[in-house]
């Protein structure tokens, strides 16, 4: 008798999976923005419009809004969206937040100056499509800013999926964003300090890509 293969629960019902995680009273990934996103701040000017995908509890979207950007945040978890709006209220900024499954979401077209994707891990069948949709959501000259865990993250205890198929390689991102000008594509080893669930040495891949003008 063989056991059924394990399926990552974030794939079968992402809203319910992340609701359970974000249902904690505290912010499980903290309220400070992602360090790689902060490092790209010179590319982001007040008044720009930004789409923050898989924005979770809102730490990145709210930080962008605090810096004068017009932010649309989208996440599959109602609990995450609720906490993102609460954080925006506490920080006294405006955040437009949408609860949606990216697999079925009606992606905007050519509306944004930047798309931010931080530790959003999608299955292979959706990953490439979603990345193409991120590019399509940009106005010409707009930027995608992305950080994700790579397969080497399985050796670390600092967070991320335990399913190899959900981890991204530089080659995959190069293929996914083949229609873009890739300005940066690096394998990094940051020391994460992002709430209780992202602590310690990590293995990530970092990308900045521009939609051709």
Image: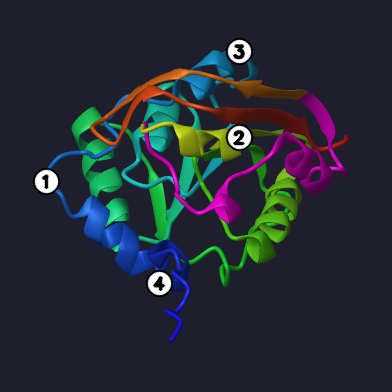
**Mark 4 vs mark 1: in front:** 4
**Is 12 located above or below residue 124 in the figure?**
below
**Mark 3 vs mark 2: in front:** 2
**Mark 1 lies on residue:** 25
- Which residues fall within the magenta stretch? 158-183
Residue 34 percent across, percent down from the top left: 43, 26
Query: Which class describes the residues within 10 Å of circle 2: few (<14), some (14-19), or many (20+)?
Result: many
Label 1 element class: loop
Image quadrant containing the N terminus: bottom left
**Mark 3 vs mark 4: in front:** 4
**Is 1 located above or below residue 155 in the figure?**
below
Q: Find the distance from the CA under tag 3 to the CA under tag 4.
A: 37 Å
Mark identifier at residue 13:
4
Label 3 element class: helix
Label 4 element class: loop
**Mark 2 lies on residue:** 146
Residue 156 percent across, percent down from the top left: 42, 31
**Mark 4 vs mark 2: in front:** 4
Seen in the image, is 209 located left or right of residue 54?
right
- Whether the residues at callouts 4 and 1 have beta carbons within 8 Å, the answer is no
Query: Which class describes the residues within 10 Å of circle 4: few (<14), some (14-19), or many (20+)?
Result: few
Label 2 element class: strand
Q: Find the distance from the CA under tag 1 to the CA under tag 2.
A: 27 Å
Task: Name which of mark 4 and mark 1 comes first in the sequence.
Answer: 4
Mark identifier at residue 42:
3
Residue 122 percent across, percent down from the top left: 56, 56
Q: Nearer the viewer, residue 139 or 3?
A: 3
């Amino acid at each position: 008798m063989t056991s059924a293969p394990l399926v990552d629960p974030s794939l079968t019902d992402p809203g319910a999976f992340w609701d359970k995680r974000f249902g904690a009273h505290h912010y499980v990934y903290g309220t400070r923005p992602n360090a790689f996103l902060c490092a790209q701040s010179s590319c982001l000017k007040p008044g720009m419009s930004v789409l923050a995908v898989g924005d979770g509890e809102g730490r990145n979207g709210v930080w962008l809004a605090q810096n004068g950007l017009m932010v649309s945040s989208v996440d599959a978890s109602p609990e995450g969206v609720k906490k993102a709006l609460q954080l925006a209220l506490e920080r006294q900024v405006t955040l437009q937040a949408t609860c949606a499954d990216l697999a079925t979401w009606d992606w905007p077209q050519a509306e944004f100056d930047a798309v931010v994707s931080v530790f959003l891990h999608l299955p292979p069948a959706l990953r490439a499509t979603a990345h193409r949709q991120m590019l399509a959501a940009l106005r010409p000259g707009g930027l995608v800013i992305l950080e994700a865990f790579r397969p080497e993250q399985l050796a670390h205890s600092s967070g991320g999926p335990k399913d190899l198929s959900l981890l991204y390689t530089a080659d995959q991102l190069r293929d996914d964003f083949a229609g873009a000008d890739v300005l940066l594509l690096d394998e990094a080893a940051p020391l994460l300090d992002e709430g209780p669930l992202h602590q310690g040495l990590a293995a990530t891949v970092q990308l900045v890509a521009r939609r051709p003008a």
